[in-house]
Image (tube, rainbow, N blue to C red):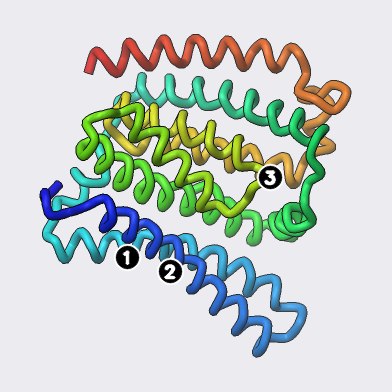
């Protein structure tokens, strides 16, 4: 990037992008609460979430356009091969299961706050249309916006500025975890962020990290809605079943191995 672009500028754009999403979402939810009938306020909340997530990358795109930056290059929007897609998917499945078990273990020591339960109730599929709406917003729109902003823009700049990939990944992941304003899941989000950063660096494309991010949100959404149906084969005494954990470890091993081979071959 241009040498006049500083760390202060970059973090400022990231913070502005996140705040713009929050402000736009809050405005839509507030208008819905004031002017819509009570039975429609839930839809206003969904719309606020949807539009807010989509608005997140607007300040970033305006900033890059004003600077006449090559957007695809700056945000690591690059095609990846089918083997890389498969390897990233296998690795993602394994990582998501391990993070889920870590979350279950942490719940033994920390009580889940009320706002997480309220958030879970908002993600329930009340109808087929609402299910499609949530799937697109939570599984596609939110991960894409966050990957473009954090891994495509912020991490790439830090890698180039510091000439230290590890430091860039760790710093981006920490900021990514903090910006979610969820101390209960801080460690889980940080670990996930590190893996997202690794995938982007290894493949040179945000699509690899998008696969992990989207898969994580998809599985979380499925368990929010079909926990009892999935618990029969997935859980054992309130934890991830040992055989599922074993399969996840194999997925991580083979996913990493396959990804390293395919990424280096390219």
The residue that label 3 is drawn on is 184
Q: Residue 17, labelled with which disc? A: none
Pointer 2 with pointer 1, Cβ within 8 A? yes
The residue that label 2 is drawn on is 20
Kindly identify the residue that appears in the image at 53 percent across and 56 percent down: 137
* Left-right relation of 164 to 138: left
Kindly identify the residue that appears in the image at 40 percent across and 45 percent down: 147
Q: Residue 59, labelled with which disc? A: 1
Specify the quadrant that holds the C terminus. Answer: top left
* Left-right relation of 63 to 49: left
Q: Position of residue 122 (x, y in %)?
A: 71, 60
* Left-right relation of 3 to 203: left
Pointer 1 with pointer 3, Cβ within 8 A? no
Query: Is 113 rendered above or below residue 122?
Result: above
Q: Position of residue 140 (x, y in %)?
A: 48, 49
Classify mark 3: residues with Cα within 10 Å, few (<14), some (14-19) or many (20+).
Answer: some
Pointer 3 with pointer 2, Cβ within 8 A? no
Query: Is 107 rendered above or below residue 182?
Result: above
| Secondary element at tag 3 | helix
Tell me which numbered mark, 2 or 1, is placed earlier along the sequence: 2
Q: Position of residue 99 (x, y in %)?
A: 63, 29
């Amino acid at each position: 990037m241009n040498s006049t672009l500083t760390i202060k500028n970059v973090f400022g754009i990231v913070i502005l992008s996140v705040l713009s999403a929050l402000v736009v979402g809050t405005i839509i939810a507030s208008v819905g609460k004031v002017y819509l009938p009570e039975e429609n306020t839930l839809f206003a909340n969904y719309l606020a979430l949807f539009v807010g997530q989509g608005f997140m990358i607007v300040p970033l795109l305006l900033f890059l356009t004003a600077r006449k930056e090559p957007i695809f290059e700056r945000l690591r929007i690059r095609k990846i091969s089918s083997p890389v897609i498969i390897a990233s998917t296998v690795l993602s499945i394994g990582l998501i299961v391990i993070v889920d078990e870590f979350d279950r273990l942490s719940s033994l020591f920390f009580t889940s706050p009320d706002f997480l339960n309220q958030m879970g109730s908002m993600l329930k599929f009340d109808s087929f249309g609402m299910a499609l709406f949530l799937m697109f917003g939570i599984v596609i729109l939110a991960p894409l916006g966050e990957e473009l902003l954090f891994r495509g823009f912020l991490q790439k700049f830090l890698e180039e500025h510091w000439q230290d990939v590890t430091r860039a990944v760790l710093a981006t992941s920490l900021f990514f975890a903090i910006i979610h304003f969820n101390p209960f899941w801080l460690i889980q989000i940080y670990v996930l962020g590190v893996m997202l950063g690794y995938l982007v660096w290894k493949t040179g494309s945000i699509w690899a990290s998008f696969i992990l991010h989207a898969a994580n949100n998809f599985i979380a959404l499925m368990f929010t809605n079909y926990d009892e149906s999935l618990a029969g084969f997935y859980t054992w005494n309130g934890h991830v079943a040992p055989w599922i954990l074993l399969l996840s470890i194999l997925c991580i091993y083979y996913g990493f191995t396959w990804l390293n081979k395919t990424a280096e071959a390219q």
